[in-house]
Image (tube, helix red, strand yellow):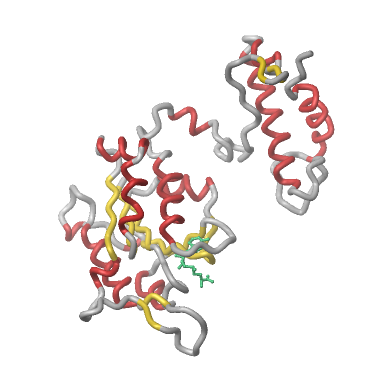
Amino acid sequence: MRIDILTLFPEMFTGFLDGSLLGAARASGLLDIRVTNIRDFAEGIHRQVDDRPFGGGPGMLLMPGPVVACAEHVVACGLPAAPAEQAPAGPAAPVILLTPGGRRLTQEVVEELSRRERLILVCGRYEGFDARVRTALGAEELSIGDFVLSGGEVAAMVVVDAVCRLVPGVLGDEESARQDSFSNPGRLVEGPQYTRPREFRGMAVPDVLLSGDHGKIAKWRHEQAIVATRRRDAGPSDRSGEPSTNQSPVPTKKAPELTARAVETTPRSVP
Ligand code: SAM
């Protein structure tokens, strides 16, 4: 998979891209990740990339010229093996603007992005992009959540990290990604996990996990995942498992039974 990141702060990606999982996947050729400085496409002696918003208001906006020129250059570069004239453009190589108001990133969206051959992520700064950038590039918009960061760089890192671990071969054990939170058919969060020692500060590992009965263990884990999902979806004001306004994939009918079982199997105190 090839990923291009367009930013005014390329140095922010140095440690991130060289780190363990991504660094190894890049070295082995599974991932081709390139960072391009938007300022290289700015004109004039000062290489200006931002200006005040028409109509007034605080802060500065990214001017359309440098962002669009940079993105068009990167799109035209194409995949490494393909000649430039055969480079995937349009839908095959969509430009993605990181914006707080874009489509929300979920594991489902991450899975969809991981199936693409190529991603082009554009990091905003200041008060964001001139609206014409989106139209000129036919770009998608992606948000990593309902909060505001100072720039798109951290958002791009979140997207790259989440997407790349799903690219076949990047994780040592692909089964582990299939068992992660939000990755199962019900999009449940993972229940409690334990490793050694068997007892820690008076808390023992639930007996079922030491039973060696794989059927029982799988059933217990599934029940715990349902309980954990209900608890999370209940929100901070209601951790009792009562239905909340949030969407939950857990059938409400089974909740009391499952909650009771979860209490039974919560690590018991060791006398
Ligand atoms: N004025 C913008 C608004 O109210 O929507 C916020 C601009 S923000 C300070 C600067 C840049 O950070 C954005 O252009 C975007 O690239 C990035 N950014 C901030 N929050 C983000 C989020 N939740 N998801 C993705 N990118 C984000």
| Left or right: where 232 falls relative to 264 | left
Q: Hey, which residue is sitting farthest front in the picture?
A: 201
Reply above or below: 244 against 99.
above
Snapshot quadrant of residue 114? top left
Q: Quadrant of the C terminus?
A: top right
Residue at coordinates 43% horizontally, 61% vertically from top-left?
A: 152
Residue at coordinates 79% horizontally, 50% vertically from top-left?
A: 237
| Left or right: where 33 falls relative to 128 | left
| Left or right: where 190 falls relative to 114 | right
Q: Camera-side residue: 149 or 271? A: 271
- Total numbered badges shown on the rendered structure: 0
Q: Position of residue 41 (x, y in %)?
A: 24, 71
Q: Hey, which residue is sitting farthest left in the picture?
A: 83
Q: Position of residue 17 (x, y in %)?
A: 33, 45
Q: Quadrant of the N terminus?
A: top left
Q: Hey, which residue is sitting farthest bottom in the picture?
A: 55
Q: Position of residue 174 (x, y in %)?
A: 44, 30
